[in-house]
Image: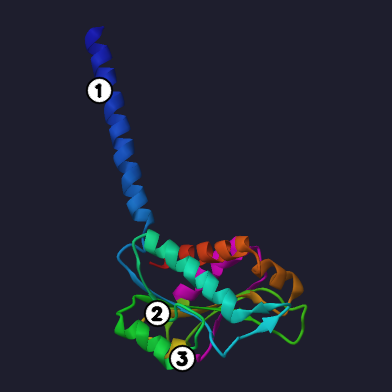
């Protein structure tokens, strides 16, 4: 009886030990951006406000989201290259060059949309037509954002944007929503949305890497 109790106790300790190690392994596996170098580009800046509507300036919104994204990525062990760390303008080619020179493994440019029709809303993500890996990255980001925001899925699209064309690594440009849509603009002004946006971009990068 004593031996049986000892064996049972040993088995329980082993199971708990295995669970502990397995949990640790899963946590490490989950932090898939760890060790990656990721370029985060906050669009516009300085004299270039980007899209404006309903009191919202694209340059301010995307910088805030980019900064929050940087924090999440660094907490997960990624090295982050920020193309701007304040309210100033950076030439488009310089943004790509920063990522290239820094040996970035992926590049995400963060933007907000505008449309002459104020009823247009939703989230979309772009990659360069020649960048198939960028297409995979864009799809992962798009899926993550639409799930996080509950927004209209405008899909993954291709475009010959400078930051996408001149980046040597897989690159995507995310359009969070439309500042010209009253409901989306009001939402994007909130602290909660900006945290959600940072989480969505982080999760999209996690899925990609």
First in sequence, mark 2 or 3: give its number: 3
The answer to the question of whether label 2 and label 3 lie on touching residues, with beta carbons closer than 8 A, is no
Kindly indicate the quadrant of the structure image that contains residue 184: bottom right
Does residue 43 appear to the left or right of 12 in the view shown?
A: right
Q: Which residue is at the front of the view, 49 or 135?
A: 49
Q: Quadrant of the C terminus?
A: bottom left
Q: Tell me what residue is drawn at x 43 percent, y 68 percent.
A: 70
Quarter of the rendering containing residue 1: top left
CB under 8 Å between callouts 1 and 2? no
Q: Secondary structure at mark 2?
A: loop
Which of labels 2 and 3 is toward the front?
A: 3
Instruction: Choose between 42 and 18: the one closer to the eye.
Output: 42
Separation of marks 1 and 2 at Cα, in angstroms: 50 Å
Mark 1: few/some/many CA within 10 Å (<14, 14-19, 20+): few
Mark-to-mark CA distance, 2 and 3: 16 Å
Up-down: is 24 above or below 184?
above
Q: Which mark is residue 92?
A: 3
Q: Which residues are magenta?
A: 136-162
Q: Which residue is mark 1?
A: 10
Rendered view: 116 above or below 12:
below
Q: Quadrant of residue 60?
A: bottom right
186 with respect to 162 (left or right): right
Residue bearing mark 2: 170
From what the image shows, is residue 86 above or below residue 89? Answer: above
Label 3, label 1: how many angstroms apart (C-alpha)?
A: 62 Å
Tag 1 secondary structure: helix
Q: Position of residue 100 (x, y in %)?
A: 33, 85
**Percent from the top left, x then y, of residue 15?**
31, 31
Residue 145 is covered by the magenta coloring: yes
Is residue 206 something that shows in the picture?
Answer: no
Residue occupying the point 67% across, 70% down: 152
């Amino acid at each position: 009886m004593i031996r049986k109790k000892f064996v049972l106790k040993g088995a329980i300790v082993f199971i708990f030990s295995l669970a502990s190690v397995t949990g640790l392994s899963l946590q490490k596996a989950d932090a898939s951006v760890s060790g990656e170098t990721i370029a985060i580009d906050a669009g516009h800046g300085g004299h270039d406000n980007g899209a404006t509507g309903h009191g919202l300036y694209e340059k301010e919104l995307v910088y805030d989201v980019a900064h929050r994204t940087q924090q999440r990525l660094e907490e997960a062990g990624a090295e982050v290259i920020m193309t701007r760390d304040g309210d100033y303008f950076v030439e488009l080619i310089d943004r790509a060059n920063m990522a290239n020179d820094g040996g970035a493994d992926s590049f995400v440019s963060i933007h907000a949309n505008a449309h002459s029709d104020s009823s247009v809303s939703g989230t979309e993500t772009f990659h360069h037509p020649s960048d198939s890996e960028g297409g995979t990255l864009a799809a992962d980001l798009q899926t993550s954002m639409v799930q996080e925001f509950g927004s209209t899925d405008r899909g993954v699209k291709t475009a010959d944007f400078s930051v996408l064309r001149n980046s040597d690594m897989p690159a995507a440009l995310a359009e969070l929503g439309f500042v010209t849509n009253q409901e989306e603009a009001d939402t994007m002004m909130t602290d909660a949305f900006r945290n959600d946006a940072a989480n969505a971009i982080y999760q999209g990068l996690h899925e990609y890497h």
